[in-house]
Image (tube, rainbow, N blue to C red):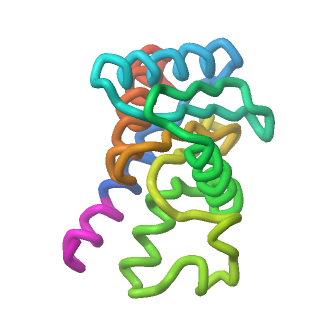
Amino acid sequence: MSESDVTAAVSEVEAQEAELVLTAFTHDQAWHLGVRLVELATERDLPVAVDIRKGTQQVFHAARPGTTPDNDSWIERKVRVVYRFGASSYLVGLRARAKGRDFNADHGLAFQEYSAHGGAFPVRVSGVGIVGVVTVSGLAQQDDHALVVEALRELAGSQPAR
């Protein structure tokens, strides 16, 4: 990805994060979001693991054929990035890349604990802030991210206006 491509991707992901702010996020909504992600993955025969958190509580987890326990490790590392930096794991990684920096080295964080690779997206509620994280692992990072954004757009579109 060229420098201009990285800059454009940063802007695009920042816009997605500004757009995808929910009016509420209940356990039932988390469940439906997880089920929708699994449906999309099944329709497309994608080997992904899906994880949804409210706060630190895991409220949904599913793994499709073709995934391994390593996908769960990636999920944990991506989720830590979202909670620590307050942005999607993809955006955090893109910002580091745009500066020509190595994310883990720059922050003194072990790769086995933190991974700024796409797929974990903050669940924000208007007037509240980040209340959870939705994560997909198993595809190329931009594709993990895109699948989450697609499903979150559906959920956001089904909610009353902010």
The structure residue drawn at horizontal position 55% and vertical position 40%, both measured from the top left corner, is 68
Where is residue 47? Give x, y as percent: 40, 33
Seen from the viewer's position, the closer of residues 70 and 78 is: 70
Seen from the viewer's position, the closer of residues 58 and 45 is: 45
Check residue 96 for magenta coloring: no
| 133 sits to left or right of 9 | right
The structure residue drawn at horizontal position 53% and vertical position 47%, both measured from the top left corner, is 120
User: Which residues, given as a range, are shown in magenta?
Assistant: 1-11
Check residue 7 for magenta coloring: yes
| 37 sits to left or right of 7 | right
Placement of 69 over or under 105, stated as above or below: above
Quadrant into which the N terminus falls: bottom left
The structure residue drawn at horizontal position 37% and vertical position 35%, both measured from the top left corner, is 147
| 51 sits to left or right of 143 | right
Q: Is the magenta stretch mostly helix, strand or loop?
A: helix
The structure residue drawn at horizontal position 66% and vertical position 24%, both measured from the top left corner, is 60
Placement of 78 over or under 68, stated as above or below: below
Where is residue 105? Give x, y as percent: 60, 85
